[in-house]
Amino acid sequence: MRVTIFRPISIIALLITFASCSSDSTDETPQVETSSNYTVNNNYTYSPIETEIANLINQYRVSKGLNPLEKINHISNVSEGHDDYMISINTLTHALFAQREENLRTTLGAVAVGENIACNFSTAQSVVTAWINSPAHKANMEGNYTHFGIAVKTNAEGKMYFTNMFIRK
């Protein structure tokens, strides 16, 4: 019985621990081939839940004495592409983070990049609360960033995927 309970708890703890990515070094070269083929895509229309998540994150940051973040549509487009990828493989993952990071460094001049992801939440408040309650996600939300983007996509079964990316210029 003890092993039966311990195994799922261990798996959940590992998922929470590894469900956040960030990079804050200007000295490191991304671990992907450099590409100058990235172009800025500033066309993005925010859904009500995306706008609410952005507002909740900024309210949280201000309540902690931090600067509110400015939305950049290109970051939301990059985030949306990652939601599409996670939906296509039906898995929550930070795979290919280095490519998203390189995109934001190349196109926007980001010197720091962070990412929070989630799935299967139904409201803006529930996903933001989950991120606040996760040390790694909370660290990104409280990080030394200046801009962010958010994208929420729903798969065919109605499961919502969330990608929230942060940058410092």
Image (cartoon, rainbow, N blue to C red):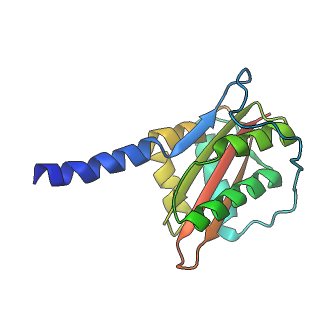
Does any portion of residue 78 appear in the rendered image?
Answer: yes
* Residue at the spot 71% in from the left edge and 59% down from the top edge: 81
Check the image and report above or below for 11 versus 113: below
Percent x, y of residue 60: 58, 46
Where residue 110 sits, quadrant-wise, is top right
Where residue 107 sits, quadrant-wise, is top right
Residue 45 left/right relative to 91: right
Percent x, y of residue 155: 58, 74
Where residue 102 sits, quadrant-wise, is top right
* Residue at the spot 54% in from the left edge and 36% down from the top edge: 139
Residue lying furthest top: 27
Check the image and report above or below for 159 versus 142: below
Residue lying furthest front: 33
* Residue at the spot 59% in from the left edge and 59% down from the top edge: 162
Q: Between residue 11 and residue 135, name the one nearer to us.
A: 11
Residue lying furthest left: 1
Percent x, y of residue 43: 87, 62
* Residue at the spot 53% in from the left edge and 66% down from the top edge: 90
Q: Between residue 25 and residue 33, name the one nearer to us.
A: 33
